Amino acid sequence: MHSFLLVAIALATPFDSVVRVRLDSVRDVRIMASLSDDMWSHGIYAGNAEYLVTPDQRRALDATKLEYCVMIDDVQALVEAEGTRLANPPEGGIADTEWFSDFKNLAAINAHLDALVASRPDIASTFIVGQSLEGRPIRGIRVSALPAGTTAPAVLFNATQHAREWGAAMTGMYLADRLVETAATDPRVQALLSKVEIFVIPVVNVDGYSFTWADTANRLWRKNRRDNGDGSFGVDPNRNWGYQWGGAGASTNPSSETYRGTAAFSEPETIAMRDVFVLHPNIVATIDFHSYSQLVLSPWAYTLEICPDAALLQSLGDSMKAAIASETGAEFVAGPVGSTLYLASGGSVDWTYGSRGALSWTIEVRDRGTYGFLMPPEEILLSGRENLAAAMTLAEAIAQTALISLPVPAPTGLVPDQTTLMSVTIRELVVGAVSQRALISRVAGGSWSSDPLVPVSGDTHAATIPAVHCGDAVDFYVEVTLASGSAIRYPTDAPSTFLTATATSLTIVAEYNFEVASSGWMYGVGGDTATGGAWIRGDPIATTAQSEDDHTPGTATQCAFTGQGTVGGAAGNADVDNGITTLQSPILGTMVTGAHLRYWFWYTNNLGGSPNLDEFVVQVSGDGIVWTTATTVQSSATLWREADITLNGLLAVGSAIRVRFIARDLGAGSLVEAAIDDVKIVNIGCPAVIGDINGDGLVNGFDLTILLSQWGGAGSGDLNGDQIVGGADLAFLLSNW
Ligand code: 0X9
Ligand code: ZN
């Protein structure tokens, strides 16, 4: 299976190349890091990473067992072609409307900022962020219809902390350009600029950027131009910020591409950026644009820990990702830096969030490695458009002055006759922005009523969902009244849309946590074809692809999983290979309409040479012969997840419930690991209620009307079975009202 496009190189290549290397273990990462310090991009953690390698390094790579493919064979050829193109602009020069037809040097960028201000001096002004090490001004542009010094929320978009990331610089310029030039014609932009202040700093690392333009030999320079005094140059600005400076993913070696500098904020460029945040306390959100990989990244970057605002950052990040996709169709991945990309400390995203409290993202613009930093000019406008869509989404969110977020997922089931507490996060972006916070709810489609939210701590508030009888639904939404008198709601367009939770009682019919052997479970069945990694029951040993622990809380250790790894072993240890392996249950209960199958699972298929090709199939059967697919899992996650499958419609009522889990390895070179724990059959529903004549789960006036219409005769209103509808039946009905 490990046939990750092994490129056999008979002749040593004379070029610097970009290679995508498969990294399955910490050991692989170390080997590669010792070979090349110039990581261009990193795939999903411990998957594939791209590196610039010299001919010597590529020969050394060939000598290792690491598998790789070539993304760009001759990097310098691309650089030279770009240089030639830029040195020979189309005849007659480039019209101003075509400013984004090719990349621009620092002088052209500064001139364009001035042109934008000249075009709309009423809403645009430039400012000096600070001076670089070599004395260049770092410039920004402010765009807003509000007066300077406003307390309205502000957002800061900056780009190009890394010199070679030209696509990011042009993306930043596109944001500034469109915000200024469409302010008069686009009602959305016009409305936005009347509510927020927007700062754009297209090039932070002005010295490095100028250096990359000075000579094609310098095109791939990343850091600033600090003379480190040991013959090496450059501090990585994005390892120099002062939150958890000096932690993981930053180098102490001045020659390294990720050199952190001699101290936090040792560099004038990072000091200047910090000062912008200090000078404008109303900056509540920020995006730091980089290239490349198509990622919307949120804190933390220095650790894999979940940050306190993870739910809010993820929901806004997902909205930005969706805005990008709807603009150009480009697919971005949204998630925290540490778990999505790699650990990196001393970055702006952690300081702006951790020290400054701003909602903060790093966006890695296109592409996904075809050209990397050497983006073709045709993609400038696409990158500009899709990231403007993301920037507008964020800016419009903060323009509301407050943000509401609910737990993910919000509750959909309630315990009958008990109130349910739900936490609601309300972030004020402007001091005193919020005057009232309420949960608006209604029971069983009745009329809406409002209950204030109770402050818990910080932004967290408690909402009480009212108690209802089994079968009843509560519709609800959150309403925040702003100081301005207007209101914002969650969901945004409530009460047209709202959330619903239904009270149901839940009976566990069968439960198995794999702690003790159970003769009924089969670990592999006839017809399985996998040659490795068959299902077993035991205490798993972690690899990057497989969990170290079972799911069951407490002292339990056992689960079912596909093949045991070895301590410290590679991810490819005992994963599923070359076919399918099946875990099959005994009879787990009798099918009723409210039956649900619930289980916890772990599934990864995103590692290895041909990732994401495989599937994890869950099937159910009412007779052990005919199997119906209940769900197919394709998405990988290195964590336990719970599944809840409604069996109604899949199995006939009265049949004997069986389930099987099939892990399969189809793609050559992919890694598949699956695990299952805490399998349950639960019956969800409400016990039949005497008096509920129309079967709507309630005993009420509708039932009374039916009963009275049958008075003295026979019919469904005969609740005591005495063949006549009368006073005894009425008494029954009223007692269950
Ligand atoms: O490593 C970086 O600085 C960024 N990637 S890049 O390829 N453009 O160099 C990622 C930055 C993630 N965010 C922070 N660590 N702040
Ligand atoms: Zn970067």
Image (cartoon, grey):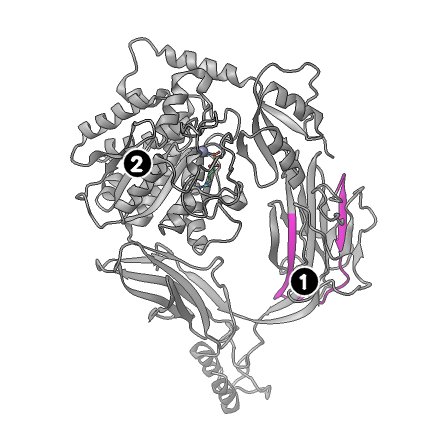
Coordinates of residue 579 in the picture (x, y in percent): 76, 41
Give SS at disc 1: strand
Coordinates of residue 10 in the picture (x, y in percent): 71, 16
Give SS at disc 2: strand
Specify the label residue 200 is tagged with.
Answer: 2
Q: Nearer the viewer, residue 392 or 199?
A: 199
Q: Say above or below: 410 vs 272.
A: below
Coordinates of residue 649 in the picture (x, y in percent): 63, 58
Residue lying furthest front: 229
Q: Is mark 2 within 8 Å of ligand 2?
A: no
Q: Is residue 25 visible?
A: no
Mark 2 or 1: the one toward you: 2
Specify the label residue 678 is tagged with.
Answer: 1
Total labels: the figure holds 2
Res 599 → quadrant: bottom right
Q: Crowdedness of circle 1 by 10 Å Cα count: few (<14), some, many (20+)? A: many
Q: Residue at x 74, y 35 (%)?
A: 1
Q: Crowdedness of circle 2 by 10 Å Cα count: few (<14), some, many (20+)? A: many
Q: Nearer the viewer, residue 500 or 240?
A: 240
CB atoms of marks 2 and 1 within 8 Å: no
Res 462 → quadrant: bottom left
Q: Which residues are magenta?
A: 577-603
**Label 2 or label 1, whichever comes before in sequence order:** 2
Q: Say above or below: 272 vs 462.
A: above
Horizontally, is 188 left or right of 583 in the view?
Answer: left
Instruction: Give the residue type that dot 2 points to.
Output: Val
Instruction: Give the residue type that dot 1 points to.
Output: Asp
Measure the C-alpha gap from mark 2 to mark 1: 51 Å
Coordinates of residue 45 in the picture (x, y in percent): 58, 41
Res 174 → quadrant: top left
